[in-house]
Image (tube, rainbow, N blue to C red):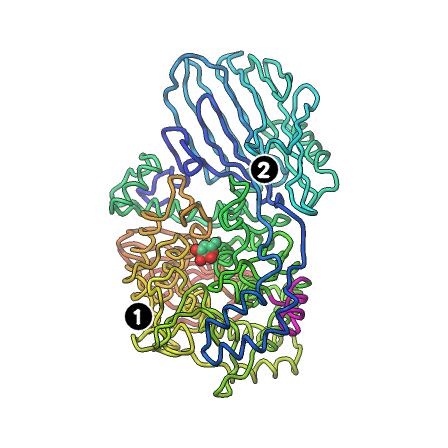
Amino acid sequence: MIEGSGSDGERLWYAQPAKDWNEALPIGNGRLGAMVFGAVSDERLQLNEDSLWHGGPRDRNNPDALPNLPRIRELILAGRLREAEDLALMALTGVPESQRHYVSLADLELRFAPSGGAAGEYRRVLDLRRGVTTVSYVQDGVQYNREAFASYPDQVIAVRVTADRPGRLSFRVRWNRGQQRYMDVVRTWGTDGLAMAGHAGGEDGVAYSAAVKAVVKGGTSRTIGEYLLVEQADEAILYVAAATTFRSADPELACKEAAGEAARRSYEELLKRHVTDYSALFDRVRLEIACPAGGKEERPTDERLAAVEQGEDDPGLVSLYFHYGRYLLISSSRPGSLPANLQGIWNPHFLPPWDSKYTININAQMNYWPAENCNLAECHLPLFELIERMREPGRRTAETMYGCRGFAAHHNTDIWADTAPQDGWPPSTFWPLGAAWLCLHLWEHYAFGGDEAFLARAYPTMQEAAQFVLDYLIEGEDGRLVTCPSISPENTYILPGGESGVLCAGASMDFQIIRALFDACLKSARILGLDDRFGRELSDALLRLPETKIGKHGQIQEWMEDYEEAEPGHRHISHLFGLYPGEQFTPEATPALAGAARVTLERRLAHGGGHTGWSRAWIINFWARLRDADKARENVLALLGHSTLPNLLDNHPPFQIDGNFGGTAGIAEMLLQSHQGTLHLLPAWPAAWGDGCVRGLRARGGYTVDMEWSQGLLRRVVIAAARAGVCRIRGLGPDIVELNVEAGRSYAFAAPFEREFEASL
Ligand code: FUC
């Protein structure tokens, strides 16, 4: 432990109950989630189940797309943008225009018997080491404690309420679905439980159920009407389960089985099973930053955040935020669950912002940026399952709308893996590269883990995404291959005559994604010994893609022509895909492009960029890749100070989880990079954050890295190799160190780094 890092470095804590959702604390097991509010007299658990979405699957592909596609292309290439947009709005939108939306499950309300006395010594904590949230207070001389967690092994949320004096615990429990309550049925379940059932609405939508069962010590439980009553108890444990027909033929039965089985275990055993499962993931990584000022952990989290908003630096809060991002990923994306959506799983709305689905022109991808480098590769799997499910609908989209082979998706997808365009909003709608970008996550998973069996399964999916792109590209005037129609998500350009437009032939980001995908396919085919013919098609196409251009401001051009941006401070910075998450622009290999990327960022920021949480988080990753530690630090503090809610969830606004994940990935990227075949140790870590250490970060090539630094210098490094190979390391001295590594061995280096010895781990 680093001196001054404090023992509370992995806890969020508050001295008062949450006054609204933005102060409540999230728990989750990937599938079930709850926001816990912690009021003294009325506890509220706002619950979610990941598969509760309105409506069923539909084929929304517009049959008029293909016949009108040549005309739309002609109009775009002729610069007749208004006409192109007008026709696209009719012919290229989905029919109907929108995919399905996610829906809140319900509130579970606990109303405690009034006691008359005021509560003191109040404390509300989220313990990231154990994945448990607690509320404690003293009232009328009685110490009350509540504890809640969401168990992955037992698929329930467990809540334990205790009083330290016999018989002082009395409360009633009920379900509340607000304005949706007219659609539900609540049934008593024996004398100690309540079940609720309903339908999420819409054609072929899912039916759901939720159940709560109480196990009481030293008192009684019974039901009256729609209420469950716990009376004069010492302790009560509530087991909460939820299910939908997305996975279970009989959700009510599934809930009763899960809650019933959990209730057969002792609370201690259930908690132990949860902590063992959860901490096996969480404990893989540890970051400790010494707090030069010391003692900040003594202050409640919301006060620390408010101080950062006022301009204070708080490296301890940065590491807490980093750990929180890992906590949130473990809690919202586990094997068997759906991927983390725009709100992770924590959404209180029946019609949420942007439907709380998957926006795949940046947001869903950003959710998974920390999965590999933060050593949570399993949490990446739900995304891959969704990509698999998108293949069949994506083939229909590719064929019916564009006459292409392969599979395509636009800028959103939903629970049903819908791939047709979303909305009728030109700056985002007419962009068919969603699947191409998503498939790069398959490659990244291989790049980090090196699992060839996985790559063999993933390659056909990547290949199909590339197949669509090959067919979708058309020859531009100069013989180059271009995407058309396309957009640069979600920016608008201005033509020299003053007309503005969004539709274009060849947005820069498209080529950066396509290059990355084709390269990944070529490398995969080589590794797997496959596909010479397809590989040749890709290599030929790669030679004909437009090169990235540097524009009149010295910036990376966002479009093929050097147009002015309508919003130079736009939140999307799509044309820097090649800097991050891509690796086409690097200070070593392409210094001119890296320099232009810096100008692009500076321009965006000078015009108010980074105003959404996720945009700010992306900017952190960009600066980390440009090795600018001070700028990276400045933007981490801006993310905390301007785009973070009191419960440390990201504030788009409103709450959107991508900023948490992008921010966590960015902090990891400041500590360690591994693109372009080289591990780079502390590439962008600010000296201002003092001494520290990190353990368990993952690097491409199958490496796990531990580091210690002090007084701005790296002191000790341990690199564990999962695979044999040549490990290239930057940061151990002036030159790159090349090391032949054996699988299963660890290599340690101590400053001044002349000595390498086998680590005893
Ligand atoms: C994209 C972004 C918005 C928001 C939405 C969910 O459209 O441009 O800022 O994040 O997705």
Q: Return the residue nearer the eye: 97 or 601.
A: 97
Q: Residue at x 59, y 13 (%)?
A: 219
- Residue 599's disc is 1
The first of marks 2 and 1 along the sequence is 2
Q: Amino acid at mark 2?
A: Leu
- From where the camera sits, is residue 697 visible? no
Please check the rendered image and state whether residue 409 is part of the magenta-colored stretch, yes or no.
no
Please check the rendered image and state whether residue 407 is part of the magenta-colored stretch, yes or no.
yes
Helix, strand or loop for the magenta stretch, by majority: helix
Quadrant of the frame with the N terminus: top left
Query: Magenta part of the protein: which range?
Result: 393-408
SS at mark 1 in the image? helix
Q: Return the residue nearer the eye: 152 or 518.
A: 518
* Cβ of mark 1 under 8 A from ligand 1: no
Q: Position of residue 313 (x, y in %)?
A: 27, 47
The answer to whether 153 appears left or right of 10 in the picture is right
Q: Amino acid at mark 1?
A: Val
Cα separation, mark 2 vs mark 1, equals 46 Å
The residue singled out by tag 2 in the image is 105
SS at mark 2 in the image? loop
